[in-house]
Image (spheres, rainbow, N blue to C red):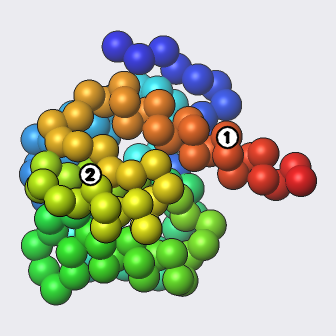
């Protein structure tokens, strides 16, 4: 079980079509102190963002149902919601090169360990906090 971090009162949105994967990572992140919003695909993602919810980090599966895949969503987020950090996840070979353009740290390969996702979230939040100080 992860240790709760009292400073981790940030919101993470998990967009993952596999309900079991989504439930496991969402529960883990909640146990770490994050507020978590879950979604299956792009329609729910945009409903949340357009509804005015503040999202700090978006954990986004590359292979999504619907009209937009994770790459397309990450690109739109980069253009319209610069305040949202994006972490792409994928088990599909060949996604590393393309995803470096959309998330600095590259994708997290599935299957992943929840602690690795949390570590990446902490890196992104710290980077954003440090950038605000300068």
Which label belongs to residue 126?
Answer: 1
Q: Residues within 10 Å of mark 1 (few under 14, many from 20)?
A: few
Using the image, determine if residue 94 lies above or below residue 52: above
Q: Is residue 55 visible?
A: yes
- Which residue bears the numbered disc 2? 89
Task: Name which residue lies at 13% across and 49% down.
Answer: 91
| Residue at the outermost right position | 134
Task: Name which residue lies at 87% across and 49% down.
Answer: 133
Q: CA distance from mark 2 to mark 1?
A: 20 Å
Q: Quadrant of residue 40?
A: bottom left
Which label belongs to residue 40?
Answer: none
Task: Name which residue lies at 55% across and 64% down.
Answer: 84
Q: Is residue 15 visible?
A: no
Label 1's element? helix
- Residue 89: % across, % down: 26, 51
Label 2's element? strand
73 left or right, relative to 40: right
100 left or right, relative to 21: right
Q: How many numbered discs, if any?
A: 2
Task: Name which residue lies at 78% across and 45% down.
Answer: 130
- Residue 129: % across, % down: 74, 47
């Amino acid at each position: 079980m992860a240790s709760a971090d009292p400073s981790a009162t940030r919101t993470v949105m998990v967009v993952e079509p596999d309900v079991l994967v989504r439930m496991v990572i969402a529960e883990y992140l909640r146990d770490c102190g994050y507020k978590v919003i879950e979604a299956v695909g792009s329609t729910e993602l945009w409903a949340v963002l357009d509804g005015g919810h503040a999202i700090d980090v978006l954990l986004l599966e590359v292979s999504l149902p619907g009209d937009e895949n994770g790459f397309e969503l990450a690109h739109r987020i980069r253009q319209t919601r610069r305040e949202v950090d994006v972490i792409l996840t994928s088990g599909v070979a060949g996604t590393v090169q393309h995803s470096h353009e959309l998330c600095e740290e590259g994708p997290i390969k599935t299957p992943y360990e929840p602690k690795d996702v949390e570590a990446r979230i902490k890196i992104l939040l710290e980077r954003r906090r440090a950038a605000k100080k300068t």
